[in-house]
Image (cartoon, grey):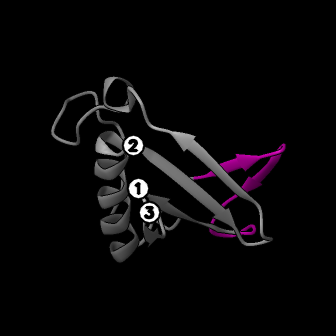
Amino acid sequence: MTLTVGGRNYTREQGDFVLFIDGKGPYYASDAGFRVGGDNFRVVWDALRTGRSVQARTGDGKVVTFPLTGAAKVLPARTSKLFQCVTW
């Protein structure tokens, strides 16, 4: 999972970020290429589908908050054939 804020990309290798969903977290979803990271990604995906808001905090101190209204309509369930994300 990656995050772009103000034109800057945040990934596990570049700046990193953490997520708070409905005030719960932190969730480290950027390291989905590792076994534990894959587990984190799946937890985050499910929480994004059912949550009300997500806040991302970047390694350099930026904070952005987004509503999650309607997220379940565009993020397929992990059991769906439409779920195309590959994790460990």
Judging by the rendered image, the residue that carries numbered circle 3 is 23
Judging by the rendered image, the residue that carries numbered circle 2 is 52
Query: Mark 3: which secondary structure?
Result: loop
- The amino acid on which the numbered mark 1 sits, given as a three-letter code, is Asp
Relative image position of residue 42 (x, y in whole percent) = 30, 57
In this rendered view, identify the residue nearer to me: 35 or 3. Answer: 3
Relative image position of residue 69 (x, y in whole percent) = 41, 30
Q: Is residue 6 a member of the stretch shown in magenta?
A: yes
Judging by the rendered image, the residue that carries numbered circle 1 is 22
Relative image position of residue 61 (x, y in whole percent) = 78, 69
Residue at the (28%, 42%) spot, across then down: 50
Query: Mark 2: which secondary structure?
Result: loop
Please rate how many residues cluster around mark 1, counting C-alpha atoms within 10 Å: few if below 14, some from 14 to 19, many from 20: some
User: Is there CB contact under 8 Å for labels 3 and 2?
Assistant: no
In this rendered view, identify the residue nearer to me: 74 or 82. Answer: 74
User: Is there CB contact under 8 Å for labels 2 and 1?
Assistant: yes
Compared across the picture, whether 81 is left or right of 17 comes to left
Residue at the (75%, 52%) spot, across then down: 9
**Magenta span of residues:** 2-15
